[in-house]
Amino acid sequence: MTDVVIRATGLFTPSQSISNEELVAAFNTYVAKYNAAHAAEIAAGELTALTESSAEFIEKASGIKQRFVLDKSGVLDPTRMYPRFAPRPDDALSLEAEIGVAAARDALARAGRDAADVDAVICAASNMQRPYPAMAVEIQHALGIKGFAFDMNVACSSATFGIEQAANAVRSGSARSVLVVNPEICSAHLEWRDRDCHFIFGDVATAILVERADMGEGGWAILGTKLATSFSNNIRNNAGFLNRCEDTDPNGRDKLFRQEGRKVFKEVSPMAAEHISTHLSALGHTPAGVRRFWLHQANLSMNQLIARRLLERDATFDEAPVILDQYANTASAGSIIAFHLHHEDLAQGDLGVICSFGAGYSIGSVVIQRR
């Protein structure tokens, strides 16, 4: 069977960022306006007054200190609290494809590849800009890649699920080299007016070049991939064609990201740790033999708990890097950012695990080894 490697990764980071302090100032202004506008209903007990947020609350709850976004002004406008994205004509490159292309070109440049070397594109992301044409096909066209392309969505596990599909395509011989692209415009799906989640997400795009090992030296050998899903409503987004029905509110709260955070923490953490442990065991390895874990960047406490369950002690930053503080939760791209920024120092033969987990529930792990 053909050996498969991760040859390179790419990253696009927006130029704009929002600190916790900036976000809280806008949010609290919105809260004050809302409470004042609904003072009578609140006094009558018909509505509940909104509670202010704080930078301390955000960091304690999540470990996040800031986030990158594609539009800062719309999010920080207390009368709007939502990014402003101008519609583009059909013959212009879409916004999601634009950032996906940027990340893909970074990965290709790092690998010393061009479009002629790639046979397929998978756009694997939580937040698709549209149903069709597929974002992957648009990205493929913009890059000048032949072959085939398709979209896939497994929420925050989309990147690891995409890596398995890419690896399978290479092993089967249907492609020599596959680009897995993860453009995540999370700011468009976040309810910035909800204190429980207004701080969670940021925007970014990553790309992973998966190809035959015999196409070059170096890279990371993919020793194995493992995927798992288990249905849960604890993380949900109901945006879709039903929004256009007359009996629904297109701006309703359930049409944006929502979650039962405590339930997710309690249920997913042990599932992820067990998933990684059994995957390693099936490949003849143990968590103690892993040089580095690149975990999904959703919540600092969750990552710390998963690592503690695996190693039976607290993990160091070197063992389980964190990018959550700067990037916030970037959905499927989080574990790939962690890998992209924290892998160059590993030596030949070092073992690593890329793992993501999210809505579905979905969990994906990729065990890799430095060549």
Image: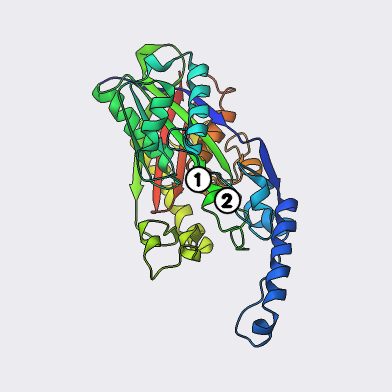
Is residue 122 among the parts visible in the rendering? Answer: no
- Reading the image, the residue beneath label 2 is 299
**Residue at the spot 51% in from the left edge and 17% down from the top edge:** 109
Is residue 223 among the parts visible in the rendering? Answer: yes
Indicate left or right for 184 with 26 as reference: left
**Residue at the spot 45% in from the left edge and 67% down from the top edge:** 249
> Which amino acid, by three-letter code, is at mark 1?
Ala
Which callout, 1 or 2, points at the residue further toward the start of the chain?
Answer: 2
Foreground mark, 1 or 2, reads: 1
Few, some or many residues within 10 Å of mark 2 (<14, 14–19, 20+) = many
- Determine the image quadrant of residue 164: top left
Q: Position of residue 34 (x, y in %)?
A: 68, 71
**Residue at the spot 39% in from the left edge and 56% down from the top edge:** 240
Find residue 331 and name its label: 1
Indicate left or right for 229 with 125 as reference: left
In depth, the one of 112 and 79 nearer the eye is: 79
Q: Secondary structure at mark 1?
A: helix
In depth, the one of 262 and 52 nearer the eye is: 52
Q: Secondary structure at mark 2?
A: loop
> Which amino acid, by three-letter code, is at mark 2?
Asn
